[in-house]
Image (tube, grey):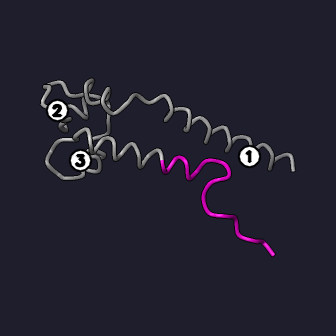
Amino acid sequence: MRRTLIVLALASTATLTAGAAMAQMPSPEKIIKAWDKNADGGVDKAEWVAAGRKEKRFAVADADGDGKVSLEELKSGMAKMKAAAAQTAPGKGPPAADPH
């Protein structure tokens, strides 16, 4: 029983920490302004990597495949991340299966 409580406490802490990180994340507008070094209105792959982002994630963020992550694409991606985090929060997601 004690081990179960410890595991649940750790899982809850991890989920809350992830939620807090999302809450403290700068706005998409601030991110674009900070990362868009050539001021063309989008973040290209070089700017993405220079901002410390993983290169392989660029293709996912660049939804229309034009070689830049636009403000709209960043907003959409961040909304998807926020929704996924909400689904993993305690009390969210699919109901547990009935063991009986």
Task: Find numbered disc 1 in the image and state the secondary structure of the residue it sits on.
Answer: helix
Residue at screen point 31% across, 46% down: 57
**Labels 2, 1: front one:** 2
- Picture quadrant of residue 35: top left
Task: Identify the residue under disc 2.
Answer: 41
Q: Which amino acid does label 2 sit on?
A: Gly
Task: Find numbered disc 3 in the image and state the secondary structure of the residue it sits on.
Answer: loop
Instruction: Please say if the residues under marks 2 and 1 sit with CB atoms less than 8 Å apart.
Output: no
Magenta part of the protein: which range? 83-100
Task: Identify the residue under disc 1.
Answer: 7
Residue 94, compared with residue 69, is above or below; it is below
Q: Which amino acid does label 1 sit on?
A: Val
Q: How far from the left and from the top, in percent, is residue 86?
A: 55, 48
Q: Is residue 97 magenta?
A: yes
The quarter of the image holding the C terminus is bottom right
Instruction: Please say if the residues under marks 1 and 3 sit with CB atoms less than 8 Å apart.
Output: no
Cα separation between marks 3 and 2: 13 Å
Cα separation between marks 1 and 3: 37 Å
Q: Residue 62 carries which label?
A: 3
Cα separation between marks 2 and 1: 45 Å
Residue 87, compared with residue 11, is above or below; it is below
Q: Residues within 10 Å of mark 3 (few under 14, many from 20)?
A: many
